[in-house]
Amino acid sequence: MSSNTPFIVDKNLGVNMTVEPEDLTQTNADGEAVIAPTQEEKYLFDARGWLLFPGILSDDDIRDMREYALQVKHDPQSLPEHEQSYLAGPLQKLADHPRVVGFMNEFVAHPHLASPDGYGFRMEASGIRFRSTRTGEVGRFSPHNGNGLFRFAIDSHHYQCIPGKAYSGLTRVVWELAPVKKGKGGTLVVSGSHKAVYAAPESIHDPNSPIWDTYECPAGSLLFFTEAITHSATPWTDETTDRVAIFNLYNTIGAKWSNWHPHPDLLAAMPPKRQSLFRDVRCAANRIGGNGRYHGGNLSDVRVK
């Protein structure tokens, strides 16, 4: 079955905006080729609102990243101020991991703001979800969001789609740096609720209701979900291991949800392409490279087939 060709309108008098793969950033800041989602992966994310990639990090990366994350969490003063961040050290390359860039190119980026030198999307925040039965930091059940297809774009928690193309809005990326056992405290989601047309039923308030989906995965796994989906934390009950999860957040170039910024010295030390994740929040004159203008917005700039 062939994929649909979407009809996308820009500021171009209603002409279809054609998008070619080369219009989007094809390598990350480390020179690695991005990994685009397959047709099945696109279908599953659009249908469910979330997608899991089990075990994609190497054992060495998992070890180094988990150790660094726990150092930031428990002993930040042992690090320089600008490195007291879940975006620093070995964790930094998670920000534009090839799978993350490929996914964001499909569901968040705008091609007229992308270039070979800069991404067509932004990074909003980076933090940790540390959960442990030993310390009592187990988290709590708190369902929120959903119905994103019908929400205004004001706060970015919305989802848009037409045949052949979907836009995820504010999008969460979770890196599980320790194993997650099903039913022991991973993130809960209500599959498809980003497109729900009805208010949530009373069963939404029961974390054990079959309305909720969750997952299990080895350390080094990657979870995407749209913030437009109904989701929740749930208490961590696994006494054999702690949860160490890096929660990163992404958005469009022209929208901002959080009040988070990387430390200026941390940002200055990043490769230029990675720095483009944190550029000013605007569309006009905000394309990296060339003359910086919003590329291809007017009718004279688009390719008409």
Image (cartoon, helix red, strand yellow):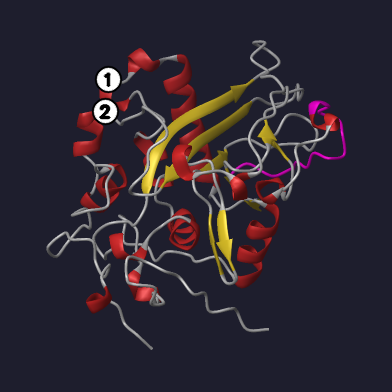
Magenta span dominant secondary structure: loop
Q: Quadrant of residue 185?
A: top right
Relative to the observer, which residue lies in front, 175 or 12?
A: 12
The crowding category of the residue bearing disc 1, from other C-alpha atoms within 10 Å (few below 14, some 14 to 19, many at least 20), is: few
Residue 151 among those drawn in magenta: no
Determine which residue is flagged by label 2: 263
Name the residue: 49% across, 43% down.
170
Relative to the observer, which residue lies in front, 149 or 29?
A: 149
Dot 1 amino acid type: Glu
* Circle 2 SS class: loop
Camera-nearest label, 1 or 2: 2
Q: Where are the magenta residues, as a range?
A: 205-220
Picture coordinates of residue 86, whole percent (x, y): 41, 31
In the image, residue 56 above or below residue 211 = below
Residue 216 among those drawn in magenta: yes
223 with respect to 304 (left or right)? right
Determine which residue is flagged by label 1: 81
Q: Is residue 81 at all visible to an observer of this figure?
A: yes
Q: Is residue 114 at all visible to an observer of this figure?
A: no
Relative to the observer, which residue lies in front, 23 or 77?
A: 23
